Image: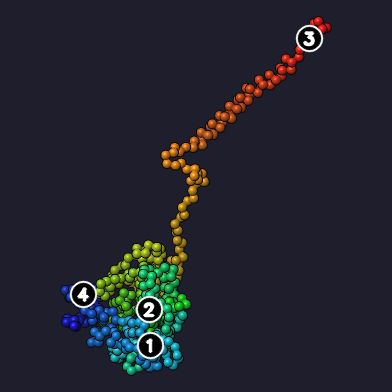
Amino acid sequence: MGYPEACPDDATIAAFVRGEPLGERAVEIERHLSRCPACRQMLSSGGPATPTRQAPIDQLAIPYAGRMLAHFKIERQIGRGGMGLVYLAKDTRLRRKVALKVLPLNVSADDVQRRRCLREARAASAVVHPNVATVFDVGEAEGIIFIAMEYVEGPTVRDLLVNARGPLEVHEAVRITSEVCRGLAKAHSVGVVHRDLKPDNVIVSTDGTVKILDFGLAKRTHADRETGYGTETGVTTEWAIGTPSYMSPEQIRAVPVDARSDIFSLGVALYEMVTGALPFTGSVIVEVFIAIDRHEPPLPSAINPSLSPAIDHVVYRCLRKDPAERFQSADELREALFAAIAEPVVEASAPPPPPPSAPPPSMRPQPGQVQDTDPPTGLLLTIGFLMVFILVAAAILIVPRVMRSKAALPFQGIPATSQSAR
């Protein structure tokens, strides 16, 4: 059964999300957005208002395996997003596995969107870096746009978070983020912005290498000298590509974005890695957008007390509403991360050892016994001095008498001479 109310146009929804005064109409729009699945799908997928927006994404692509698309044989679905489904496929020409992203039919049917997607995907294929999953091919077949990308085996950061059931170890989160920064720095150096960074689009390969996925729908921020491709401006009602919880304030406001938008999205992912929670939440997408645009999240250390103030500072600077207040480059963010984990950590001190004079357990008084108390050290010294004084005095008084007594003994032993004997 379809939703009976008429959906607001995109300009009205955009004005509501930006907080523009709409009077009583604002309450009606908020109620409508919380109940209408078509509008929620439109907000999460990034598509403008078209009659096809009410069709689920599975009906806008090819959701079945075994089909040949150009020279790619589709095996099975391995992912999905707001801008299409991703399949594991085999390149029958080069005999290698690829991740094949197939865009929705409404994108392929719209000539403006079709040309823009093809142009931007081809531009993104120029981003070649060890931390970026390479775009191999971009093309059309049977009216369907596809992007063939490097297939990387291993868990995504989303898988790691699910398996951890909480935050990742901070050094691992920093390592992953720093490698993402390296890949972003390369992309930004050629004027390409990802626009959809999130844990689902970062994978850790079986050899530990971190790779950014899905650069095939990135956006150029300036004109390329060879192709002339550049940012389209003047679009006020177009919803930017991205996943709501990870979108920057610029994307929500539908204004042109640059590399600092990726810094914000990476900051959201880093926040989630070190806390296990999202910084901006809401029961409906509109509430998430309002939180991103107007609210400050809790400090990461308020959720994970093991985090240092330095990590708090790095994450918070990534999430500044004003792009000028964020890190201005991925390299700057990477350096700040290394500095944050290099700060000395105050460890808990070990318990003090027992005093040397402490008696062993066998000599300790048992319950009921009277414990002897040692006399003070000063008293012992006083008694010692008195004893020495007494001994010296005794020696002075007694020794002379003994000597005189011994001297008188020989005269007492001589017998007296008789007169008669003479």
Vertical relation: 289 (above or below) 75: above
Name the amino acid, label 3: Thr
In the picture, the disc for residue 201 is 2
| 4 or 3: tag closer to the N-terminus | 4
The picture quadrant where one finds residue 388 is top right
Q: Quadrant of the C terminus?
A: top right
Tell us which disc is closer to us: 3 or 2: 3
Name the amino acid, label 1: Glu
Q: Residue at x 42, y 39 (%)?
A: 368
Tell us which disc is closer to us: 1 or 4: 1
Question: What is the distance, in whole Å, between disc 3 and disc 2 at their CAs?
Answer: 137 Å
182 or 381: which is nearer to us?
381
| 4 or 2: tag closer to the N-terminus | 4
Question: What is the distance, in whole Å, between disc 1 and disc 2 at their CAs?
Answer: 21 Å
Q: Residue furthest top?
A: 420
Q: Residues within 10 Å of mark 4 (few under 14, many from 20)?
A: some
